[in-house]
Amino acid sequence: MTAVFGQEAGGDLDPLSPLDPVDGRELLAATEPEGPDGDLAGGSPGDAGPAVREKATLGGPRRSDRLPAGPSDPVLLEKALAELERMVGLEPVKRQVRAVSAQLRMARLRAGQGLPVQPPKRHFVFSGPSGTGKTTVARILGRVFYALGLLGGDHLVEAQRADLVGEFLGQTAVKANELIDSALGGVLFVDEAYSLSNSAYSKGDAYGDEALQVLLKRAEDNRDRLVVILAGYPEGMDRLLAANPGLSSRFTSRVDFPSYRPSELTAIGEVLAAENGDHWDEESLEELRSISAHVVGQGWIDELGNGRFLRTLYEKSCAYRDLRLSTWSGAPSRDDLATLRLPDLMQAYGEVLSGRGPVPGPEAPPL
């Protein structure tokens, strides 16, 4: 079975198996009793009471497990997907997010018609270099879940190793649980997640391992109230998943974020300027295309931070424009205040790429 939102472990699905093909949990019988709030009797949301759990009969109906009857907000969903479409590039990522949104919406419709519904996947691996929009897409994904009534809120909590791992023995579990508690109802986004499994330590990474175990347990125990996204460079994420079978079995949906191409970098520069009421003149825009082609061709773009490089270049170009205008004896016009020119860009580029050598003359970037 292929995951809609990335990669999934292979294997043929037994159509008569009483196990959920997503994560191996037992499917719940359609007649399973519920508590007064619609939760499974005998436990909190996400925890089935032992007295009421039973296998579905082969070929019989299954309860629409973990698909709450909460409100669905089509306007909010449309806004979230529109924000995704406005992002430059990332076409493979956009297709995957749209597919997940469609899958979740159809699951709600199936549940409304009494059809079998598999529990929605809530935990993902985002793999890609820095500056490629992973955090932004994570926020959008959280809004999609919220709009469909699958999360109580649309907030995102960002974390790295230091936010999960304690300094002393016994602190890690407390610290990690407190952080996860703050993310309940929304998205927990763990950047550079591979740093939780540091093979460089001669005696192993006991604190990182403990944080991972807490994260795994809470991701499972609170799967109805939390989306967990582990993010980082592809090589690091590969090592992390290979070293921890528990992670690889639960985080089966992987989204790969590509580095930006020259034409996309130029477009990002234009979007950043337009969002702030600025524009590049024709000469500076042509040079921006050349710079984008050069940093990609030299293999520098991942180190420079992809989209972050363009934001820095734009902001520094604005600073050099303001410095240039401040030397004028007269007041600059509205157009002068909003136009970025070649000297502004070249000074900014020289500062950002100090020591890397000059950019060649303008040329058509590869598509």
Image (cartoon, rainbow, N blue to C red):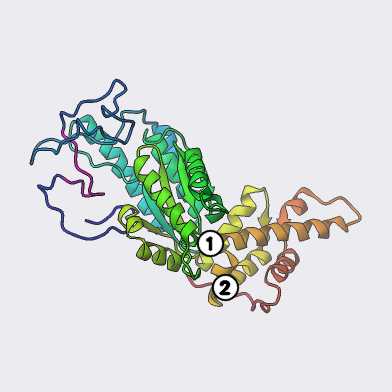
| First in sequence: mark 1 vs mark 2 | 1
Which residue in the structure is indicated by mark 2?
300
Label 2 sits on what residue type?
A: Trp
Which residue lies at the image location 27% right of the left edge and 28% below the top edge? 42
Residue situated in front as seen by the camera: 48 or 114: 48
Q: Residue furthest top?
A: 36
Work out whether 362 lies above or below 22.
below
- Residues rendered magenta in the picture: 19-29
On the rendered structure, is 130 left or right of 4? right
Residue 102 in the image: x percent, y percent?
A: 31, 43
Given this view, does label 1 or label 2 mark the residue nearer the observer? 1
Which residue in the structure is indicated by mark 1?
130
Label 1 sits on what residue type?
A: Ser
Mark 1: which secondary structure? loop
Categorize mark 1 by other alpha carbons within 10 Å: few (<14), some (14-19), many (20+).
Answer: many
The residues bearing labels 1 and 2 have C-alpha atoms spaced at a distance of: 12 Å
On the rendered structure, is 312 left or right of 217? right
Work out whether 354 lies above or below 315.
below
Work out whether 34 lies above or below 350.
above
